[in-house]
Amino acid sequence: MTNSSLIRQSARERGARSSLALAVLAPAVLAVATVLGCGQDQPPQNLLLITIDTCRADRVGAYGHPGARTANLDQLAERGTLYGRAYAVAPETLPAHVSLMTGRYPPAHGVRINGSYQLPGAAVTLAETFREAGFFTGAVTASAVLDARYGLDQGFEVYDSVVGRAERRAEEVTERALALLPAATDRRIFLWVHYYDPHSPYEPPAELLPVEPAPPESPPLYEAEIAAVDIALGRLLEGLDRAGRGDRLLVAVTGDHGESLGEHGETYHTLFVYDSTIRVPLVLAGPGIPAGTRVSEPVSQIDLFATLLDLFALDARPGLSRVLPGLTSSSPAPDGPPRALYSETLSPRLRFGWSELTAIRTADWLYVDAPQEELYPADDSGPGAINRALDPGPDDLRQLGIMRELLSRTRSDMRGRSLESEGRAQSVEERRALEALGYLQPNADGGADGRRRADPKEMVEVAEALALGNLARSEGRLDLAERLFSWAAAADPTNGGIRYQLGLTMELAGNAEAAFELLREANRLQPGTWEILADLSALAESVGQQEVARRARREALDRTPLPTEVWRLIARARGRRGDLTSAAQAYREILALAPNDPAARRMLERLPPG
């Protein structure tokens, strides 16, 4: 059901359903108390790691949000330790989760954005370490962004990821997580459960809709999605208790990144590295965790790696993380000055050809390295913050120099401990799934000619138009998508990636000639991108430009490590225009390259013989 149809329900219906949700929630909250009330004086036996996608800290009740419906998470915080200033490494799902699982910042593990990178086998993950210690290791993820092909399945005995769709809801995730428990038999467990609901589009269950009507993609709907995850979390804890896994259970809950919700002009995430998308909840509860404790020292999400290994007395491999402060741990954080915390977003450069952003946080300051530098007092980078580096006074200049040096030192440290990681080409299915979730492809690494890359602050309106255009296209509102992409193309006239998105929209609208010309222009502005070339080849065929089609196809096949995906994209385009014989030939090309490709074989069986 779409947001618009849900919003049309009467306030009376929504109020009644909200009451029902609270009634359902009460037993789950009691389950938190039951699970965490056992074995507090003994070392932990089992580990539950919860990651809530796109979850801002300040939308959780335990972090001070008065209207939050997060009773289970709040109960965990009351019975454990809450980190009031925990920061993500990137405002994007895959690199943030890789950092959580390896204890390394993105430049050190090499995974920088969703969909285009794979964790190298040389990395040592939490799951590998726990599995070596005899634990059953299981994971349930809720988004195609965390598919096993990106490498996070390393060390998991069972890795249950989304198949054939973009995402799955919290209730299903909980059911699938509990279904893994019998496979553990009598072993200790490390269970990672990933909830995706707060990610856009915001379409909460009907019973959690706010009483007052809320516009689509608005904060009340976002907060209702967090409430849905909280209910699922309570049911998960209750299920673990019923299965006999609640005793001596250590629970760690965190977010991968936040959501801007309009701050700094950004509706969603990936563009900026302010607190709105980087500050996340982090709560630990269970054996070895002091109850009712709040830690104000800034920490990074990478610190969960060393902390969990330390709490279970496992070998913490060399990395960049430290044991979190405030715990009754046998290995306290090393002495010395507080560490500067690193965050980055490469999405502006790799998706739009603009400048990347990197940030360093200390207890007192936030510094953003950008074409137009930014310096803020800590906790003062909200939507009304002033860029203090534009006309700094003497004190700020001194601090600016300190922060630049901290960033340089951190980068040097990461280079000394980095893993080798190669970019990987996406399959057509991967690319479509990422686009359905709002991540525009392909990469657009502009600025290669030495020109100054645009500061994302200057391009925020263009980024908003692209995000909204992608959402409109995914909902079939092609006229609106075309208007938004056209405006973005006019605002950033040298951006080939924007013309590519506009061309795809025009093709869906049935205007193949216009789409063909847009893709030719995209290829001129952004030469050598295999996705653009493959789509250009398919469109050239449909408009009778056979020589252009052949040249583009040859170049696409030369430039991608996944030639099967070039042929798959061409096969689908041929099928859409009714040329079934040529489509079958393209699927045969796939099988010549990959004889066991099940999708190509299944499609070929449905098509007439050539």
Image (cartoon, rainbow, N blue to C red):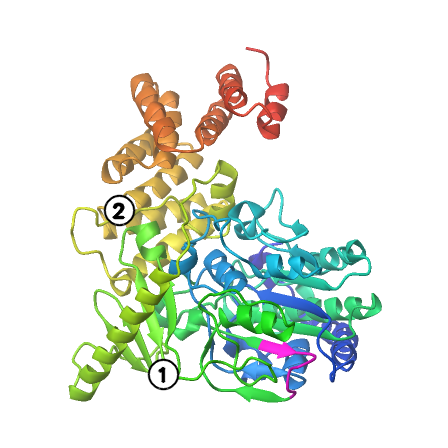
Task: Please give the name of the residue rendered at 54% of the width and 45% of the height, measured from the top-left corner.
Answer: 149
Q: Quadrant of residue 244?
A: bottom right
Give amino acid for label 1: Ala
Q: Position of residue 19 (x, y in %)?
A: 73, 75
Query: Closer to the camera, 203 or 178?
Result: 178
Q: Quadrant of residue 381?
A: bottom left
Q: Relative to 284, is 117 above or below?
A: above
Q: Position of residue 366 (x, y in %)?
A: 33, 78
Give amino acid for label 2: Asn
Left or right: 442, with 191 as reference point: left
Q: Pick the quarter of the image with the N terminus.
A: bottom right
Q: Foreground mark, 2 or 1? A: 1
Q: Tell me the CA gap for discs 2 and 1.
A: 35 Å
Q: Which residue is mark 1?
A: 378
Q: Quadrant of residue 260?
A: bottom left
Task: Please give the name of the residue rendered at 64% of the width and 53% of the height, measured from the top-left corner.
Answer: 156
Q: Position of residue 494 (x, y in %)?
A: 22, 46
The residue segment tinted magenta is: 283-291
Judge whether residue 284 can be spotted in this image: yes
Q: Reading the chain from its start, which is encountered first: label 2 or label 1?
A: 1
Density class for disc 1 (Cα within 10 Å; few <14, some 14-19, many ≥20) is: some
Asked whether 289 falls inside the magenta stretch, the response is: yes
Q: Which residue is mark 2?
A: 495
Density class for disc 2 (Cα within 10 Å; few <14, some 14-19, many ≥20) is: many
Q: Main secondary structure of the magenta part?
A: loop
